[in-house]
Image (cartoon, rainbow, N blue to C red):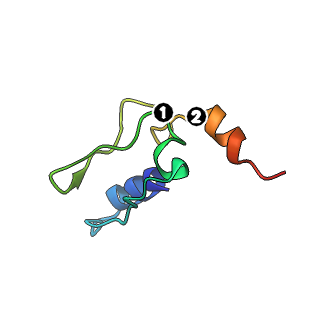
């Protein structure tokens, strides 16, 4: 998950690079209501929201949930 990788990289002294997908899969693009922002090769750590800074889209979660 991009949010967890972003926070981890920001918390370590040499954390300057993370991987993230450019896939258009609904699980990659629609699972969270506000994506982590990437701009000009940098990622912004969301500090104005609790936890990892994401909110799960329950509709998408339920659509792909395995029972």
Q: Is residue 9 left or right of residue 41?
A: right
Q: Is residue 58 left or right of residue 42?
A: right
Farthest-out residue, left: 40
Q: Residue 57 bears which disc, if any?
A: 2
- Name the one closer to the observer, 33 or 60: 60
Name the residue located 35 percent from the left edge and 39 percent from the top edge: 46
- What separation in Å lies between label 1 and label 2 (alpha carbons)? 6 Å
Q: Tag 1, which secondary structure?
A: loop
Q: Residue 22 bears which disc, if any?
A: none
- Which x, y percent locates residue 31? 54, 42
Q: Within the image, what quadrant is residue 59 found in?
A: top right
Q: Is residue 25 left or right of residue 13?
A: right
Farthest-out residue, front: 24
- Which x, y percent locates residue 35? 40, 41
Assess disc 2: are there few (<14), some (14-19) or many (≥20) residues with their C-alpha within 10 Å of its C-alpha.
Answer: few
- Name the one closer to the observer, 36 or 64: 64
| 9 versus 36 height, above or below | below
Q: Tag 2, which secondary structure?
A: loop
Q: Earlier in the sequence, mark 1 or mark 2?
A: 1
| 47 versus 65 height, above or below | above
Farthest-out residue, bottom: 14
Assess disc 1: are there few (<14), some (14-19) or many (≥20) residues with their C-alpha within 10 Å of its C-alpha.
Answer: few
Name the residue located 71 percent from the left edge and 39 percent from the top edge: 62
Residue denoted by label 1: 33
- Which x, y percent locates residue 49? 43, 31
Name the residue located 33 percent from the left edge and 56 percent from the top edge: 10
| 56 versus 17 height, above or below | above
Mark 1 near mark 2, Cβ–Cβ under 8 Å? yes
């Amino acid at each position: 998950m991009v949010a967890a990788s972003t926070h981890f990289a920001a918390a370590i002294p040499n954390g300057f690079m993370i991987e993230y997908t450019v896939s258009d899969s609904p699980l990659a693009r629609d699972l969270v209501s506000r994506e982590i922002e990437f701009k000009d090769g940098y990622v912004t750590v969301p500090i104005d929201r609790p936890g990892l800074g994401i909110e799960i889209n329950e509709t998408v979660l339920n659509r792909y949930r395995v029972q």
